[in-house]
Image (tube, grey):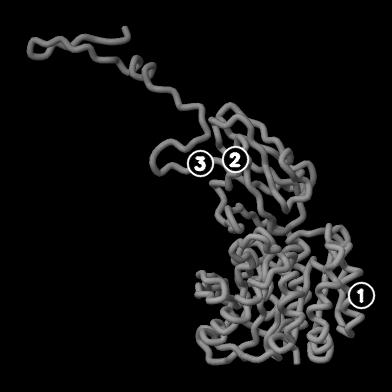
Amino acid sequence: MGCRLIALLGTTLLVASPASAQQAAPAAPETCLPQGAFALPDYVSVEQLGDGRVTFRLCAPAAQVVKLISNDIAQIPLGPNGGLPMERDSKGLWHVTTPEPIPADNYRYNFQVDGAKVPDPMAVTFSRERAGINSTVDLLGSEGDFQRWHAGVPHGTVTQITYWSEALGTMREANVYTPPGYMTGSEAYPVLYLVHGAGDSSDSWTQVGHAQNILDNLIAAGEAQPMIVVMPFGHTPDRPTTNLLANTDFGDDLHDALIPRIDATFRTVADADHRAMAGLSMGGSHTIRFGLTRPDRFSHIGIFSMGLGMGANDVADYTAANAAKLRRSAAELDLVYYAMGTDDFLYGTVAPTRAMLDEYGVEHVYNETDGGHTWINWRRYLADFLPRLFAD
């Protein structure tokens, strides 16, 4: 029998037998969601397979359509209809495996859930954009070792600072790398101002670009000078009729607010001979406009994946405004470094930009590589650029 009667103080109780209790136990829920207040999900969201392909997973039982999206992974189509479609299992766990191996490096990615961009809730590293956030993953392999954190290498420190910009009338931020030994020493250091691209933020060069790891590794190998690296927020407040690349707001903030704040706060060698500027994409445009033309401020310049010539009058307008400054730069700058990938959508700006530099006698080191407008290139440009700084 499935139950038995017990008489107690005149009351009859119906008590379930062990067999009945087992039959009444609730079934385990068919869901990938963790059960219990402190339970953890039991899946791995990013799995690097033995053949180099990568599987991505997301637990979203209520979702109808899920895609993997990324601007960094070449196999993932871009655009409003882009992304890799993911498949759902019986518990609501979505998954997709890339069709080809992904080279070892650091990548940004997110999921698109029913049309909404969603960071990976299982990720442990993230990178801010100008607005929003990306999940990041470090895929292992020897070709990525140059930009990876290594236990046996002395490490610098990254600090976020805020400062008031009188020129812009707003609070601003920057990330500042100080080299190993800075915190316990008294030495003054040269400074590199390193600017991100459009849509990114002041933490992009550390969270995605791994600039701190690249410099730690180069310094430990004796291939780069210890230096401070200042990574400012490249975007400025929107103003009607202003051009994202050509307005002067970033330059005003850089020269009138940020550089004085850095020299007053950190142990810098505060002269042009010990100051450099570099940037990628939009940051490269900032460097062309506010670094290349300021030999009174900088002695070393790096331009990654950017040039003049996107508009019909770009070069003419630039040289008309800066002819005298360019001639001075030709005489005084120690280094102008220019790097571009042959698949970059801005590759067409290389010829007019280099012709302009030649016209004004600005000697430059040109590094042409494979690849496009990607962090894969920009990390490698930085690793090639840093050993050239402040060597004398």
Cα distance, mark 1 to mark 2?
45 Å
Q: Residues within 10 Å of mark 2 (few under 14, many from 20)?
A: few
Q: Which residue is mark 3?
A: 41
Name the quadrant containing residue 240. bottom right
Of tags 1 and 2, the one toward the viewer is 1
Viewer-nearest residue: 150 or 102: 102
Cα distance, mark 3 to mark 2?
22 Å
Q: Position of residue 37 (x, y in %)?
A: 38, 41
Q: Residues within 10 Å of mark 3 (few under 14, many from 20)?
A: few
Sequence order check: which comes first, mark 3 or mark 2? 3
Q: Position of residue 321 (x, y in %)?
A: 79, 78
Give the secondary structure at mark 3.
loop
Sequence order check: which comes first, mark 1 or mark 2? 2
Q: Which residue is mark 1?
A: 355
Q: Position of residue 115 (x, y in %)?
A: 62, 37
Q: Residue at x 71, y 77 (%)?
A: 290
Q: Residue at x 61, y 61 (%)?
A: 238
Q: Which residue is mark 2?
A: 116
Viewer-nearest residue: 17 or 100: 100
Q: Does the CB distance between marks 1 and 2 fall below 8 Å?
A: no
Q: Residue at x 83, y 83 (%)?
A: 323
Sequence order check: which comes first, mark 3 or mark 1? 3
Q: Is residue 32 left or right of residue 304?
A: left
Give the secondary structure at mark 1.
helix
User: What amino acid is found at the position of numbered circle 1 in the picture?
Assistant: Ala
User: What amino acid is found at the position of numbered circle 2 in the picture?
Assistant: Ala
